[in-house]
Amino acid sequence: MEEYRITREQLDRYRAGWLEYKQRKELDLAVRYNDAMARARLAAGHIKQRYKCRVFLFGSLLLKDRFGEHSDIDLAVADLAPETNFWQLYSEVMNILHPFDFDLVELERVDPAVRENILKGGVEL
């Protein structure tokens, strides 16, 4: 069996290529994070203005180091008027947050433990 040896030059090129790839991925992720945060704020502003309610951001978008290439945007709304059509609101948010996946929940309708988590760990936008 023939032994294959890599030269120092080949190893240096490999390392440089890997470093470039890693830096590009980090930059892409930073751009994705900033875009997600901007869209979350835009959606929150729209919801608050149109529906006169409170909006909370929770989940991985709160911590930049937890936000990954497959992360979504998690929003909770509170104090919606009873006559509000939630699915209309959802559709409007979907248009603002596209192309991001997202979760939108009504704070008053989620499990009490989830509600407490959002109120303690989330941020009102």
Image: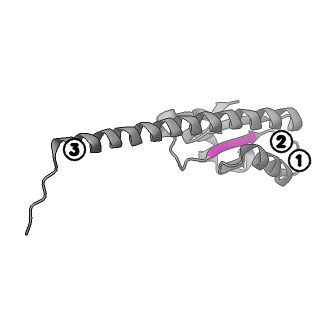
Q: How many marks?
A: 3
Asked if the residue at tag 1 contacts the one at tag 2, i.e. Cβ–Cβ closer than 8 Å, the answer is yes
Image quarter for residue 8?
top left
Crowdedness of circle 1 by 10 Å Cα count: few (<14), some, many (20+)? few
Q: Residues within 10 Å of mark 3 (few under 14, many from 20)?
A: few
Q: Quadrant of the C terminus?
A: top right
The residues tagged by marks 2 and 3 sit, at their Cα atoms, a distance apart of: 60 Å
Residue 72 percent location from the top left of the image? 60, 47
Q: Position of residue 12 (x, y in %)?
A: 24, 39
Please rate how many residues cluster around mark 2, counting C-alpha atoms within 10 Å: few if below 14, some from 14 to 19, many from 20. some
Q: Residue furthest bottom?
A: 1
* Residue 57 location, quadrant: top right
Report if residue 80 lies within the magenta region: no
> What residue sits 64% from the left and 44% below the top?
74
The region drawn magenta spans 73-77
| SS label for mark 3 | helix
The amino acid type, in three-letter code, at marker 2 is Leu
